[in-house]
Structures are given as C-alpha cells and as structure tokens.
Amino acid sequence: MDKAQIIDGKAYAEGLRARVARDVQILSNTHGLTPGLGVVLVGDDPASQIYVRNKGVQAVQAGMRSFETRLPADATLEEVLGAVRAFNADPSVHGFLVQLPLPKHLPEAEILEAIDPAKDADGIHLINAGLLASGLDGAAPCTPVGCILLIKHIRGNNLSGLEAVVIGRSNIVGKPVAQLLLRENCTVTIAHSRTRDLAAVCRRADILIAAVGQPELVRGDWIKPGATVIDVGVNRLPAPEKGVGKTRLVGDVCFAEALEVAGAVTPVPGGVGPMTIACLLRATLIAACRQNEIVVPEI
Ligand code: NAD
C-alpha cells in the first residue's frame, strides 16, 4: 500500500491567512471597517508570551488591528475583569481572548464568562458552547475549526455518513470537534480515558482525531486502512540525540506507523498547530462582519 498523504497544515494555514487578508482588504475598501483582535495576557508564562506575540504579528499581517492588555502575574480579579470589560466596550475590538493558563489565584470560569459572547474569538463562552451543541451559529473554538478545515481539504466538503472517532473530551478540543463533525453528518464517537478497548473503537474510524496529550498513544494497528488521521496532541519529549537538554515535539499518534496505514495524516509539528491562529483571524473577521450586519464571506 502507498504511504499516507502528509497533511501540510502549515501550507494550508498560510493559504487561509492569505484569504482572510484578502477579505479584510475588501471589508476595509467597501465598508471602511478594519477587524480588531485583542488579547488579555496575565503574567509572564514564556509559552504564552510567544503565542500572544505571534497572534499580534499575524493579525497585523492580515491587515487587522491588534490590541494587547498585559497585566502582572499578581493582578486581581477586578483588574482582569476590568480588562475584559474594556474590550467588550471597545467597538474597534471585534474578537478577543484571555490567554490561558491564568495564574492559579484567578477564577478562570468567572473571567471567561465575562467575555461578550459576540466577541469570544476562542469560542469558549458557555453561550457559544450551547449554540454549537444546538447546531446554531456562534463562535466555535479555533483548533476544532482548524481540524474540520483540514479534513475537508483532504476528503472534500461532504463528510456525510462517515464514522468519526474523537479521542479526548475536553471543552476546548474534544467536545467541540465532535459537535462540528456531527454538524457535518458524521457518525461520531467520543472516546476518553475510561473507554474500553480504545484500539477497537479507533479501528472503526474513517476520520480519527486524537486530542489527548499522550505521546504516540495511537499505534498503526489502531488505524483503519485509508483513514484520515488528525493529530491534535503536542507533547515535548527529551531528545538527547539533538544535544544536552534538547527536546522534540511528538503528537498523540505514532506518525511513522500511521504513515503505513492511514490515507492521510497530520504531522506534529506542522499539522494542526499552525491552523489555530489562522482560524483565530478567520473568527475575528467573521465576528467583525456579524457585529456590523455584513454578509460573512465564505472562507
Ligand atoms: P485535556 O487534558 O483537557 O484533555 C485530554 C483528554 O484526553 C481528556 O478528555 C481525557 O479523558 C483523554 N485521555 C487522557 N488519557 C487518555 C487515554 N490514555 N486514553 C484515552 N483518552 C485519554 O487536553 P486538551 O486541552 O484537549 O489537549 C489535548 C492535546 O491537544 C494536548 O496535547 C494539547 O497540548 C493539544 N492541543 C493542541 C492545540 C493546537 O495544536 N493548537 C490546541 C489545543 C490543545
């Protein structure tokens, strides 16, 4: 059998960002509207700093306005809520997010619920989760949206009737990606840490999505021949072969084994990862259109 197609998420995300930039330009020319993306960053977590910087750079490259509110690690709940309320009230900010994880003393749920659902770029407000579960239009979380775009890129727009298995039931990846697959008329199974005979469940899948956080959990013999495998997992392992203290990234799927069985598989890095910010820009563009009652472009 031929080796699986490697799904180039980096290239797809680049194309998506270019399409968003084109539509931002059209929006600006025809309606004088420039979408704005905001981020509230609390504390100095190094990974979050890099991520927030990338969001800002990519927003500006797409022709959007970028807003950042930085607060110290010991910020009070009132200060964080104040930053959220300021973005809620600012008409030039169409979408924003509070970068997670938050310092431990801050109540995450209370802060996320203070975000105006119409500006919830990450799609994690309870109202948006409810809209998604009801099959209604709201903001969906960016990584799951990225997974669906990659699947459609490989399998075409009609996913109707396909067996989809999602491993992981988190609110930010597993559950919303399962809802989006259901919306596409897939037959969806959500597997998790208590699922019995996970390998047998996975072997049913035409579309297999792993969002677990366990390095190379999914082996080649868990995969149905020809399946589309989307690996959301990001796990950092020691890589002494690269030098002292060096690390490497692996996904939740054993990539080498998947290549021998699957029809198509995302690599880690370079698969789902680059899709998240591209989808955040897409979400901000959509939010700007909805808030101004402008027809949302097909992107
Ligand atoms: P999480 O820890 O919230 O959820 C993990 C899920 O996996 C849980 O529902 C749990 O039941 C399930 N699980 C744990 N061990 C299992 C096992 N042995 N067998 C079956 N199921 C098991 O994680 P999350 O936030 O959903 O993230 C999952 C992975 O995706 C992580 O590696 C994370 O870094 C990655 N991630 C990547 C992106 C991106 O690429 N942009 C975005 C979000 C998350």
Image (cartoon, grey):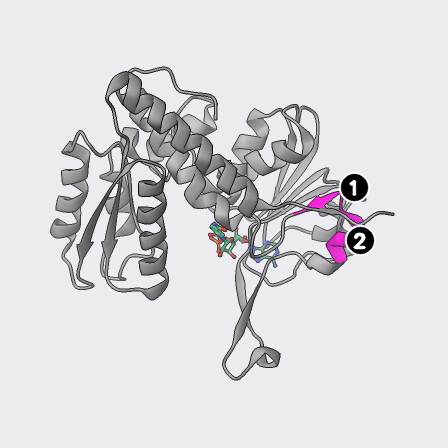
Q: Residue at x 53, y 32 (%)?
A: 179
Task: Give amino acid for label 1.
Answer: Gly
Query: Marks 2 and 1: CB-CB under 8 Å?
Result: no
Residue span colored magenta? 257-265
Q: Is residue 96 above or below residue 216?
A: above
Q: Is residue 260 magenta?
A: yes
User: Percent x, y for residue 198?
Assistant: 70, 51
Instruction: Name the outermost residue toward the right.
Output: 1
Q: Secondary structure at mark 2?
A: helix
Task: Give amino acid for label 2.
Answer: Glu
Q: Determine which quarter of the picture holds residue 71.
A: bottom left
In the picture, measured across the screen, residue 285 lies left or right of residue 210, that is left
Residue on which disc 2 sits: 260
Q: Residue at x 56, y 69 (%)?
A: 248
Q: Residue at x 40, y 26 (%)?
A: 131
User: Percent x, y for residue 50?
Assistant: 35, 59
- Camera-side residue of 229 and 79: 229
User: Percent x, y for residue 283?
Assistant: 38, 33
Q: Secondary structure at mark 1?
A: loop
Q: Determine which quarter of the picture holds residue 228.
A: top right
In the picture, measured across the screen, residue 41 lies left or right of residue 233, that is left
Q: How many C-alpha atoms fall within 10 Å of the one at disc 1: few (<14), some, or many (≥20)?
A: many
Residue on which disc 1 sits: 226
User: Percent x, y for residue 105?
Assistant: 23, 61
Residue 94 is at least partly visible in this image: yes
User: Total of numbered circles in the picture?
Assistant: 2
Residue 175 is at least partly visible in this image: no
Residue 265 disc label = none
Q: CA distance from mark 2 to mark 1?
A: 10 Å
For ligand 1, tell me if the residue under mark 1 lies within 8 Å. no
